[in-house]
Amino acid sequence: TFGAEVSGVDFSRPLPPPIVAEIVQLQNQYGVLVFRSTGLDDDAHVRYSKNFGALETIHGMNKPRRASSPNLYDAGNLDAEGNIIPKYSRAWWHSKGNGLWHTDSSFNQHRSSYSALRAVELPPQGGATMYADMRAAYDDLAADIKKDLDGKIAEHWIWHSRKLAAPLEFDKPTEQEKLAIPPAYHTLVQTAPDTSRKTLYIASHARRILGMPDRESTELIRYLLTHAQQPKYQVAAKWKNVGDLVQWDNRCTMHRATAFEDQANRRDMRRTTVYDHGPYAFGV
């Protein structure tokens, strides 16, 4: 079973260790957890996520930081002054990459484990987040493909996914952008956290597979992404209320944003991202 809605967690006070352990157990089992109307604000959101490890510090790229904490990634459509980001601006084009299937921070050499995304302001319709189960996707691969993937390493680069989503705007990232976020390298097949199941670790950030000719590498990445996007592996998290929180494990899922009227409606979403501390945390 992939994805679960969890109730009964009191977010108004620090979580006791047994509750944290239970959330981790549920996360390992279901991959994606939905908590409704948590009542969390920015500070409480950050405190909650620190139960699971150290948090990434967000360095704004093409978008000044608006949230109160450097541990909160701004995933909404608002600028630093709270205005809707204008269409065709570089920040607007940058956000188009969120609509591609991806894994948060696979483009970092020290990758992430959990992401926790919270609704602060929602549009009247649209904007659901889709998730794909990369464990089930791996399970269904043919045996010869599984054998071929063993030991292969993918290069992940955020500017690759941005170019896929906005080829004219991000055909050539600036030198500052390239220096700020260089490529990272991770194995394609891994063992899912605290289970014996194998999982595909791939995303639209994946630019090439080391040791393969460019054409074959591109074809394999495209095949794996297409395979993992099949509806049978997907679940939708529909945002219903301000304070809804969705937490997922980037090590065994992909996700993508869906469309809404981003020039007519405000959408304020804030995310914490937990550093991975497992055996694959620093890639290769």
Image (cartoon, rainbow, N blue to C red):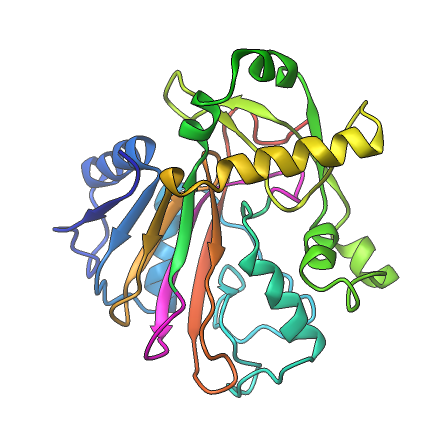
Expressed as whole percent of the image width and height from the top left, the position of residue 262 reads 50, 79
Choose between 202 and 273: the one closer to the eye.
202
Quarter of the view holding residue 62: bottom right
For the record, the magenta segment spans: 106-127
Residue 116 visible in the current orientation: no
Residue drawn 74% across the image and 58% down it: 163
Q: Is residue 50 above or below residue 253?
A: below
Choose between 125 and 13: the one closer to the eye.
125
Expressed as whole percent of the image width and height from the top left, the position of residue 196 reads 39, 16
Residue drawn 54% across the image and 49% down it: 101
Expressed as whole percent of the image width and height from the top left, the position of residue 284 reads 69, 26
Report the side of 17 relative to 189 (left or right): left
Q: Is residue 215 above or below residue 173?
A: above
Residue drawn 19% across the image and 61% down it: 12
Q: Is residue 193 above or below residue 129?
A: above
Quarter of the view holding residue 174: bottom right
Q: The N terminus is located in which quarter?
A: top left
Asked if the stretch drawn in magenta spans residue 121, the answer is yes
Residue 95 visible in the current orientation: yes
Q: Is residue 190 above or below residue 226?
A: above
